[in-house]
Amino acid sequence: MEKTIAILIYIHAGFGGIALLAGLVSLVAKKGGYIHKKAGVIFFYSMLVSAITAMVVSFLPKHESPFLFAVGIFSLYFILTGYRALKFKDPEPKLQIDKLISRTMFITGLLMIFLPIILTSKINIILTVFAIVGIIFSIRDLMLYKDMGTLKKSWLKLHLGKMIGGYISATTAFVVVNDFFPSFYGWFVPGIIGGLYITYWIRRLNRRPTEHKTK
C-alpha cells in the first residue's frame, strides 16, 4: 500500500509541477494565440491528473488530509468549468454537465463547512473559507445557466477567471507544501494575488468592444 501511495504522490507532484509551468506560460502568452492554447491544454490535463490523484491520496490510510481533498475539489471545479466555458460561445451549448459540476461544488462546499463541525464540534476556518468561495461561484454558475444571452457574452470572462482560479489552486498547494509562508497565510496569499490578476483581466475585457467578446 505504501508503495502505491508513494507512486500516486509522485504522479500528483509531477503533474502538478507540469501544470504550474504550463499555466505560467499560458498566463504570460498572448491570449488566444498558439502558445496560449497549447500551454492551456497541457495545463488542463496536468491539473486533471494532479487533482484526481490528490483526492485519492487524501483518503488513503495515514495520509488522510481534508486540505488536500479541498484543493483537489477546487482544482477540478475551476479547470472543468473554465474549460467548458469555451463551449458557451456555441450556438446551442449543452449545459447538463455544467449544471452537474456546479451542483456538485455546491454540495461539496456545504459538506466542507458542516462535516468538521459534526465530526469534531469545531469550525475548520480554512475549509470554511474555501467552501464559501466554492458555494458563491457555483450559485453564480447556476444563475448564469438560466440566462443564455448573458452566458454567451460572458464565456471569455468565465474561461479566464476559472482557469486562473485553477492555477491559484495549484500555486496554493505548492506554496503550502513547501512552507513559503508562516501559519495559514500560504492558503490565502496566492488567492489574493490571483484575485487581483483576475480583476485586472476582467476590467480589461470590459473595456473591449462587445463584438470582440462574442467572437
Image: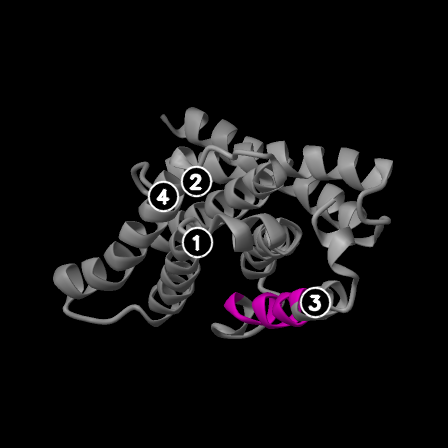
- Observer-nearest of 82 and 167: 82
> Which secondary structure, mark 3?
helix
Q: Is residue 67 visible in the rendered structure shown here?
A: yes
Label whose residue precedes the other's in the sequence (4 or 1): 4
Q: Which residues are magenta?
A: 187-198
Amino acid at pointer 3:
Tyr
Residue topped by disc 4: 63
Residue topped by disc 3: 197
Within 10 Å of disc 3 (Cα), the crowding (few <14, some 14-19, many 20+) is few
Q: CA distance from mark 4 to mark 2?
A: 31 Å
Q: Are marks 3 and 1 in contact (CB under 8 Å)?
A: no
Label whose residue precedes the other's in the sequence (3 or 2): 2
Residue 190 shown in magenta: yes
Amino acid at pointer 2:
Asp
Which residue is drawn at the image coordinates 40% and 64% (left, top)?
136
Q: CA distance from mark 3 to mark 1?
A: 21 Å
Which residue is drawn at the image coordinates 15% and 59% (left, top)?
119
- Observer-nearest of 9 and 43: 43
- Observer-nearest of 139 and 179: 139
